[in-house]
Image (cartoon, rainbow, N blue to C red):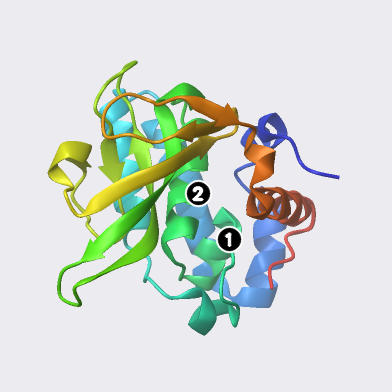
Amino acid sequence: MIVGVAQAMTELLPDEGVIARIAERHGTAAAQRLRQWRELVRTIHGLPEEQRVERVNRFFNRIPNRTDQEHWGRADYWATPLELLVTHGGDCEDFALAKYFTLRAAGVPDERLRVTYVRAWIASERRLESHMVLAYYPYADAEPLILDNLVYEIKPASERTDLTPTLGFNAAGLWAAKQRGQGQRVGEVDRIHHWIEFMQRWGEQQRTGAIR
């Protein structure tokens, strides 16, 4: 059964029972990171929205960046927020998704957030590579602000000339991405098979605390 997004929001933050089980399996440092996550959401809920965005971006960008191959032994794996925090490592998809769900839990409306596929220009190697970021739209048709695990400062999309957006998504659907405004809706998020598998796995983790 696929856990619904509303359920994911309700059960996002692990309770002490889940944290205790994780502490037994993964140690006290992993448990402490989960408690810090809970405290982050609790403390930012009443702040102005852009401050919430800044705090969440800073919180997750402290975690080391690791490729899926070195971290999970797989070419492409979308780690859940629990896996990202417990294992203390992840790649661009993991950061973008963790920021998205955390901001949703902190009260940022879904329509202001897009997990976004981009093509990133790596100047030092003179090549393009696939990358994923979180785009935050302060209002309808705004130029999005880009939350990136590799460039820590949040910048407007127009200042990220190294990125070319291709597709954005959130729980409500898929959008053709563009530099300004939210683009045209092109389908349902369930067209992304990684999303379905991610939500199923996260639902099980929220119930059991079982992290690989």
Instruction: Say what amino acid the circle numbered 1 marks.
Output: Trp
Residue 155 picture location, percent across and down: 18, 42
Residue 93 visible in the picture = yes
- Return the residue nearer the eye: 41 or 75: 75
Which corner quadrant holds the C terminus?
bottom right
Lateral position of residue 154 relative to residue 90, left or right: left
Residue 65 picture location, percent across and down: 37, 71
Which corner quadrant holds the N terminus?
top right
Instruction: Say what amino acid the circle numbered 2 marks.
Output: Leu
Farthest residue toward the top?
140
Residue 55 picture location, percent across and down: 30, 42
The quarter of the picture where residue 126 lies is bottom left
The residue under the point 13% across, 43% down is 159
Relative to 141, residue 7 above or below: below
In the picture, the disc for residue 5 is none
Q: Earlier in the sequence, mark 1 or mark 2?
A: 1
**Would you call the spot at circle 2 few (<14 residues within 10 Å), some (14-19), or many (20 or more)?**
many
In the picture, the disc for residue 97 is 2
Residue 156 visible in the picture = no
The residue under the point 31% across, 18% down is 141
Q: Which residue is mark 1?
A: 78
Give the SS element for disc 2: helix
The quarter of the picture where residue 62 lies is bottom left
Tell me the distance, in whole angstroms, between the alpha carbons under discs 1 and 2: 8 Å
Instruction: Assess whether mark 2 and mark 1 are in contact (beta carbons under 8 angstroms).
Output: yes
Lateral position of residue 191 relative to residue 44, left or right: right
- Return the residue nearer the eye: 4 or 19: 4
**Would you call the spot at circle 1 few (<14 residues within 10 Å), some (14-19), or many (20 or more)?**
many
Residue 19 picture location, percent across and down: 65, 59
Lateral position of residue 212 relative to residue 115, left or right: right
